Amino acid sequence: MPTALLRLFPIFTLLLSLLAPHAQAGDAADFVAANPAKQATLLETWSAHPDAARLPLIEALQKGRLASDSNKAPFIQTDTGWQAAEGGDAQPASEPKKLPLNNRLRGLVGTAQASHQLLAKEPAVRLAAAQQLQKSAKPAQLQLLNARVASEDDDAVRDALSLALANLQLIDPDPAIRLAAVRLLGETGDPLARTRLETLLDPAVETDAGVRTAAETSLAQVKRRLLMGELLGQAFSGLSLGSILLLAALGLAITFGLLGVINMAHGEMLMLGAYSTYMVQILFQRFAPDALALYPLVALPVAFFVTAAIGMALERTVIRHLYGRPLETLLATWGISLILIQLVRVLFGAQNVEVANPAWLSGGVQVLPNLVLPYSRMVIIGFALFVVVLTWLLLNKTRLGLNVRAVTQNRNMAACCGVPTGRVDMLAFGLGSGIAGLGGVALSQIGNVGPDLGQSYIIDSFLVVVLGGVGQLAGSVMAAFGLGIANKILEPQIGAVLGKILILALIILFIQKRPQGLFALKGRVID
Amino acid sequence: MKRRPFLKATLAASTLLLSGLFPYTLQAAETIKVGILHSLSGTMAISETSLKDMALMTIDEINAKGGVLGKKLEPVVVDPASNWPLFAEKARQLLTQDKVAVTFGCWTSVSRKSVLPVYEELNGLLFYPVQYEGEEMSPNVFYTGAAPNQQAIPAVEYLMSEDGGAAKRFFLLGTDYVYPRTTNKILRSFLHSKGVADKDIEEVYTPFGHSDYQTIVANIKKFAAGGKTAVISTVNGDSNVPFYKELGNQGIEATETPVVAFSVGEEELRGIDTKPLVGQLAAWNYFQSVDNPTNKKFVDSWKAYAKAKNLPNYQTAVTNDPMEATYVGINMWAQAVNKAGTTDVDKVREAMAGQEFVSPDGYTMVMDKTNHHLHKPVMIGEVQDNGQFNVVWQTEGPVRAQPWSPYIPGNDKKPDYAVKSN
Amino acid sequence: MNQPISLTLAQKAGPKLTLGIGAVVLAILIILPLLHLLPADNSLQVSAYTLTLVGKILCYAIVALALDLVWGYAGLLSLGHGLFFALGGYAMGMYLMRESAGDGLPAFMVFLSWTELPWYWTGTQHFLWALCLVVLAPGLLALVFGFFAFRSRIKGVYFSIMTQALTFAGMLLFFRNETGFGGNNGFTNFRTILGFDITAQGTRTALFLAIVALLTCSLLLGWRLAKSKFGRVLTALRDAENRLMFCGYDPRGYKLFIWVLSAVLCGLAGALYVPLVGIINPSEMSPTNSIEAAVWVALGGRGSLIGPILGAGIVNGMKSWFTVAFPEYWLFALGALFIVVTLYLPKGVIGLLRKKGEQ
């Protein structure tokens, strides 16, 4: 029986291949059958000779949706099931296996997709494709690009295409074309153009002196633009670091700055805020997966109230008994921080937990060719300022704020005037903790969420508050942005480690000069 | 008559008190004690906790099969709290107070360096399960993780190959401690031998726990403009999340500038949203996604164990390379003890040479006859969006370890067998 | 709190009892290492583990005592004493590394491509110069930092945060491999000290005795200082610096002296700690360690000299025990201990004992 079956098998497969509509060799079948090296050549040929009909296949490749069944028949995964890649309504003979791609193939798929998209109707798609080709166009595409530049009717797309073409024309045998290409590249601020132009300065590479001189001029222009981008980038990263420091320190500016509690558990409030974000994310994933993108917004109030409640509970049970003994609060809150860290470790595990950025907080906007501003960082800068304004309003425009300031300035006098100092302490501590919780939400979007999260921010937070001047909101803001920017100016020059050491040394020196911080409370009281 | 019970009670009470104070001085003879020396608190708990659990699971498995030499294994778990001097103290305690037959533990190089003198002084036995920088071969340690030639060099060879993207420039980014330093030193010398010039190699270090990678990622972009670049990351576990997030946000893609990491495995990826990371690489000797029956059983029993013990986040439990190395190490030790017929360190050491074990990586792992390291296959995995790796390349078969890397001058004079560092 | 509790205690209990207890403790501490010299099979033998553990705790006790001098008496809470401790340790470590390296470079330098020793390693092969460094490195740093800090009258929380920043900067600096102190690994794998095998029973005994001697001397010195006029001025300075100034005293010299003394004591403790535990690395400078030292002092009782020593013993003893007995939960116990002590024992353990004594 088995032998008979075996003998029948070739006939059987032949029959099958005759019946199956997708069996004719098309692009998808070729690709599926090829080995990686052959696949690469295929993709390169496709990029040089785009065909609008091939776009669905390339898009499937790009999304990792191309698969093949046991007969090596290609299928594309759709949201509902499988569809034969060569058209028709054939069903896979077995569960199709996805085609593995390595990075090299993925890169080539990107190029192929771009050259196919040049044929698209929408100018925006063509523009994006042309910009992609500026980075990755291959010499084999020279002809294609030439043809597209000639037939393109949208100005922006044509400019972008000309640039992509210019990159390829740098090795054109005709010096006039090279010269034009070099001049064109001088108009960009693309870091790749810089490298390309630099190689032209070598007489062994570029024989024409005129082109060499033009390359020099263009290079100078490109360098100027690049420098501009770099400086802007540094300024932005300084601001971003500053806003993170500010969010980390703002809660402390209230608990430590106003109440005088050396709150070593402040870092853990940040950590709890971040874990609240994690919990909110989990709940969204489970109960409202459609609205998942909004979870950071919901996490804000949740984190605020969770940490504020914990803060108030701590104030009631522990810190309350330690007012007037500032250095001892340090020890008690240190103990609290140890307990909170280990508690989280036992509950959530010692490993970091995953807090994913929603789409609107991932990626960035390309401002200049060498400057991308990540959305998450821009949002955090805005958020930091928002929290500062909110805190300022709370402290200066509300009854609670008035009371807090009164208690800060003179506890006994305030009590005599009928301020319920105990309640004010509790609320203020809750406010400080809550703001730390808000900081935690922001931190969760750019870094780790793990039990040790708070530990890495506690020293920086204290430095910001002390440098700014205890009890001074404006001081903390200045100090945070100052530290952030100084750090980012120093880092490229002397490295991250020495930069940080130098900053610490500068802070120590600065405090010698102004022992009360940037903004000292003026007073004539002496103890 | 009344005196006796009182006497007894006093005796019992004092014994209780004593045993409370020195919990492990009274030991039962029918078990063999094994020490587990992994940080359960402090900064390293993030990585080491799962190794402790894996060790406990392996010991349970061995006990379920009847133990070793007919005796059950009794784990002694201590917490050195990520504190390096405390590692040495706990190691001494395990060896002299608890009299353990063997210790499984340590993660960081500094913790291993801290306990090494203790193990050499007291002739103890340590199994070290993590990839490391080499430059060490102690008779009292068995290294079940990778030496640099079993991880770093094949990874770079892959990056230079056509499939790996044919990288011409290399950005070596690491946390500033001895493993990245040594690895990068070896790699630089290796790259020189492949004709890569110094101007095409950039070496950058960050402090521990560095969380702001804006400047560094901007520098990578700048560097990558000069030609096909690959980033070789020896960034320590905790800093990886901010690093990868920044990479993704600044639009660096694996197809243009791949990042190959030596310290990022499945366990680390649990804390990262992997969607922006798809295509980034890691080099290890084992991935959870390796497809073979031994590994399937290994992964299943780990998931079952995590669930049974109610470990935090057991729903997403994963296995990784150091966990596999722990598993292999404990099993090999048990086999060696059975072969030697005793737990005596010198006899077990002898029995370990050439010991074989069918391991989850799909090969029969062999302990080298002389150099105390395993022969391991090297695999390059690409991050998938489900937090797993897809193996895109692997060596033909297991590679013998070269703990004394030939790319470091002076190492050619080192013996190829273990000698005490003193 | 106008005078040290231990003094009060001593007066209350009568000098004889205090002296008696002190003598017994001292005798135990001297006999302990001698018992270590017994052969291993003797039931009375004290194991190397116990000896290094107790020795380590005694080193911490010296740090606690030194911190008490500045915090308990002069009211300056330093959160950076780990730096001085580590500097002393590193100075001693340099000597030990040189000794185990012989004429060559220390091992870590060899494989990180150093070709010659940096200038600051000069002379460290000589034990005497290393000893000088043990005193000079923390001493000079404390002098410079203290001079500027006290000149601009930085005190209270500002001072604490500044010292914390200082030790953090120190940690980062030593952490860099380029700095030439072995980076994160620090120094380890020592072989001999003054030609004696570092793991030999005799060496451990001698080291232990040296630690006991240093602790005793520091305690006596602290006692003398506390009793003297100098001690009174310090206490006055802590309680009302301005009034003291109005009385015509210049507090700067007093503060600077006690500050430098405290730093040097820490350095000496660090120097003895390193050969005993066999490793020194930048984590000793981490701010956490320094905060812990403050916890020992607070737990034992500030301004009492004896208290901090007790505190160091209790916390570290508990740590050693808990990390074995309840490896996953010991931080809860430790954290709770800090909270309970600060809430209910404001004067520390020593305050509790005194209360008992009064009843």
Image (spheres, helix red, strand yellow):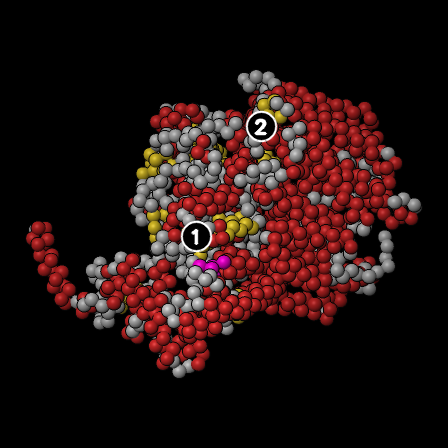
On the image, numbered disc 2 is attached to which residue? C102
Report the side of B27 relative to C22 (left or right). left
Badge 1 and badge 2 in a common chain:
no
Picture layout, residue A128 above or below residue A252? below
Residue toward you, B56 or B212: B212
Q: Secondary structure at mark 2?
A: loop
- Left of A93 or right of it: where is A195? right
Mark nearest the camera among 1 and 2 is 2
What residue sits right under mark 1 in the picture?
Answer: B260
Question: Is the residue A159 above or below the residue C61 in the image?
Answer: below
For the point 30% across and 60% down, the residue is: A99
Badge 2 amino acid: Gly
Mark 1 is on which residue type?
Val
Chain letter of the residue beneath label 2 in the structure image: C
Secondary structure under the numbered disc 1 in the rendered image: strand
Residues rendered magenta in the picture: B223-227
Q: Is residue C39 left or right of residue B294?
A: right
Residue under the image location 50 percent in, 68 percent down: A213
Q: Is residue C135 visible?
A: yes
